[in-house]
Amino acid sequence: MNIKRDLYLQKLLNSRNNGMIKVVTGMRRSGKSYLNLFADALLKEGVSENHIISINLEDRRNSHLRNPDNLLAYIDAQMVDADMYYILLDEVQMVPEFEDVLNSYLHVKNADVFVTGSNAKLLSKDIITEFRGRGQGIMVHPLNFAEFMSAQNNDNSFSMNLLLKYMQYGGLPKVATIDDETEKKEYLQSLFVQTYLRDIKDRYSIQNDHDLEELIDVVASGIGSLTNPHKIQNTFRSVKQSSISQDTIKNYLDYMQDAFIINKAVRYDIKGRRYIDTPAKYYFEDLGLRNARLQFRQTEETHLMENLIYNELCIRGFSVDVGQLSAFGKDDDGKTERKQFEVDFVCNKGYDRVYIQSAFALPTIEKQEQELNSLKRIKDSFQKVVIVGGMQPTYRNDDGILILNIFDFLLNKVAI
C-alpha cells in the first residue's frame, strides 16, 4: 500500500532545480525512502525515464556503488546530454566520503541531487558545512494522524477509538498497515532492539549498553516531565544503583536525538524573553516505539496526547518550546506569593507565535481554570489555545482563548 504523503512530495517538487543538494532525513522506517513516488511524479510531468538516476544504496545488489569512485563514475556515465538529470540516492550514508561525491555535482548545471539518510550526525548537522552552504534539509516524520487515517481500512471517519489506536501504536507506515495487534506489538518491540538500539550501539561503539537501555526506559516513562542529566543521574543512583555519570547521560540523550528517537523541548521564559537551558522535556518521535519500549504498560492518555500534539506542531513547521511564566498568585492560605506557571508549548513560526495547553479532558470548572490560568496571565496579543481530547465542539471563550477539539486540530479544520 502506498500511503499518500503529499506534504513531503510537494516539498520535493518545490525544491527542484534550486541549485542545492536536497537531503531527506528522519528516523529509520518513518517512510522517507519514498523517492520512487517523487520519480513517479517526475515521469507524470514528462521527465524521461533515462533522466532519472535512482539508486538504493541499502540494496545489496548495489553494494559496488557504495565505493565513492564507483558511484561517481556510474552517475557520470548515465548523463549523456545537456538536459536536466535527477539523481535520487537512497541511504547515502552507506557511501564513505559521500559528501565529496555530492559536492562534485554542485556546479553541474544539469544535475539535481536528492538523497535520503538515517543519520543526523552524517546529514542534517553537516548540511551547511559539508555541502558548502548549499544543502537543504527535508525532515520526514512518521505518519501524522491525518495520514494514519488514510491508511486505515475504514470510511476515514474519525473516532476516539481511532485516536487511541494511533496513540497506542504510533505512525510508522508499516505498523499502520498491520491489522493484528499482537503483530503490531512484536514488530515495534523487535524494531526498537534490532534497528534503533543497534544503530546507536554500532555507531558510537557502546560496550556497556545496559545503562543506555535503562536511560531509554527512564525517558520513555517521563515524557512531558521536566528533567535534566543531573536529575536522571540521581534516579539511576537511588533506583538503579548505577554510577553512570552526567556526561554519559548527556551523551546518550544526544545519541537518541541524533537517531531521531526523541526530541528535546527547552524552556522559554515568556516574560523575560529568554531561554532556560535546563531542565527540559523530551518527547518520542513515534508513540508506538515509546509504548513498545515500556511493554505497553504505561499508556496514560494525558501524556500521550501531549506528545502527539508536540509531534504534530513540529510536522507543521513550528519551533516548539516549553513556556514558563513568573507571576503573583495565591497560596493555599490566600496569601499573595510569586509563583511559576507553565505553558505546555510556545510555538513559533516566522513572526507568528501560538501558546498551547494540552488537556485530555476538562471535566470540572476547577480543571478548566487550572488549564486557563497560565494562558490568561500572558499579556501579549498572540493566539492562546487549549487543545482538548474528546468530541466536544470547538469554541472561543470570553477571554479570547480558543478551546480546540483534538480532531479539529489534528485534521487542521481550525487553523492555528
Image: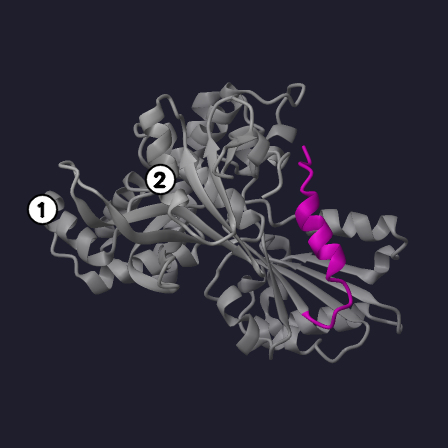
Q: Are marks 1 and 2 in contact (CB under 8 Å)?
A: no
Q: Quadrant of the C terminus?
A: top right
Q: Nearer the viewer, residue 65 or 152?
A: 152
Q: Amino acid at mark 2?
A: Asn
Per the image, the residue denoted by label 1 is 238
Question: Could you tell me if residue 292 is visible in this image?
Answer: no
Residue 284 location (% of width, % of height): 41, 44
Q: Mark 2 falls on what kind of element?
A: helix
- Mark 1 is surrounded, within 10 Å at the Cα level, by few (under 14), some (14 to 19) or many (20 or more) other residues, namely few
Q: Report x, y in % for residue 193.
A: 37, 43
Residue 265 sits above or below residue 368 on the image: below
Q: Residues within 10 Å of mark 2 (few under 14, many from 20)?
A: some
Q: Is residue 14 left or right of residue 318?
A: right
Q: Is residue 162 above or below residue 6?
A: above
The residue sitting at 62% across, 50% down in the picture is 33
284 over 257 or under it: above or below? above
Give the extent of the magenta segment.
1-20
Q: Nearer the viewer, residue 179 or 406?
A: 406
Residue 13 is one of the magenta-drawn residues: yes
Residue 333 percent across, percent down from the top left: 13, 36
In the image, taking residue 190 as reference, residue 171 lies left or right, namely right
- Residue at mark 1 to residue at mark 2: CA–CA distance: 35 Å
